Image (spheres, rainbow, N blue to C red):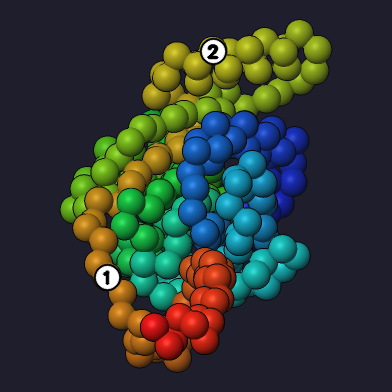
Amino acid sequence: MTELETWYQAPKGEYLLDCLRAELATQLDTAFGYHLAQVGVTGCHRLFDSSPIRHRIAIAPRPGEGIGLQAQADELPLASDSVDVLIAHHALEFCANPHQALREMHRVLTPQGRLFIIGFNPASVPGMGMALSSRLGSPLWRQRRGLSTWRLGDWLNLLGLEVEDVHHCFALAPRGRGRLRRGIETANAWCSRHGLPIGGVYLVHAIKQVAGQVRPVQRSRSPRLIDLAVPKPVPTPRPTPTSRSKGDSAA
């Protein structure tokens, strides 16, 4: 997805990344666990640096700097119930089979695991511009499948993923300099702060509502699945019992 990588390297793409990192910082700060995965379609635009989780991996279809695992979003080579936090960065709208990709994300999430889905909002000014560019033959936006938050909410509910909240940002693309640029940034911040659903990008936060199951000590593993093992606690040493004296044994 070189076209999307090029788009993110432009000033408006860099501005959007800053908005997403700031929005995710408050969410990830309270999302704990052992393993975090970011699934995307481009080179790794790290969105998880604010997370307290130590083991973090970036997944994308093509190799690149910062990519720890090469895989498609609809076929994740990870064991079931192994990821505590998953960030899907445009992984659904640029996927050939978004339903299957969402099912895979649900599968690899642990019970009560958190899913953050980032996508372009078709019901926004930037979203309408993308749709127009697609009709005019843009190679980037022609590959995109517009996915609204209400349709995404239906898919999540069917899988047992409960939507916690939805945030929007990037209501207006940054333009110009000076007062014009500051005015656009102020308007974007005001829309995001008041929860107006007109942002060009949405961030959906959902939690996997599935009862946990006790895992066996040993289980069969599929050759294509990577088991993200949970660290085991170090056993506490027990005190050595003192030997009884001869007088005690005679008694």
Q: Residue furthest left?
A: 158
Q: Is residue 124 left or right of residue 54?
A: left
The answer to which quarter of the image holds residue 10 is top right
80 versus 19 height, above or below: below
Q: CA distance from mark 1 to mark 2?
A: 46 Å
Q: Which residue is mark 2?
A: 190
Q: Is residue 39 visible?
A: no
The answer to which quarter of the image holds residue 149 is top left
The answer to which quarter of the image holds residue 240 is bottom right
Type of amino acid under label 2: Trp
Q: Is residue 191 left or right of residue 12?
A: left
Rendered location of residue 37, percent (x, y)? 53, 60
198 versus 246 height, above or below: above
Q: Residues within 10 Å of mark 2 (few under 14, many from 20)?
A: some
Rendered location of residue 31, percent (x, y)? 48, 44
209 versus 110 height, above or below: above
Q: Which of the numbered marks, if any, corresponds to residue 214? A: 1
Q: Quadrant of the C terminus?
A: bottom left
Q: Nearer the viewer, residue 188 or 218?
A: 218
Determine the residue positioned at 47% across, 77% down: 227
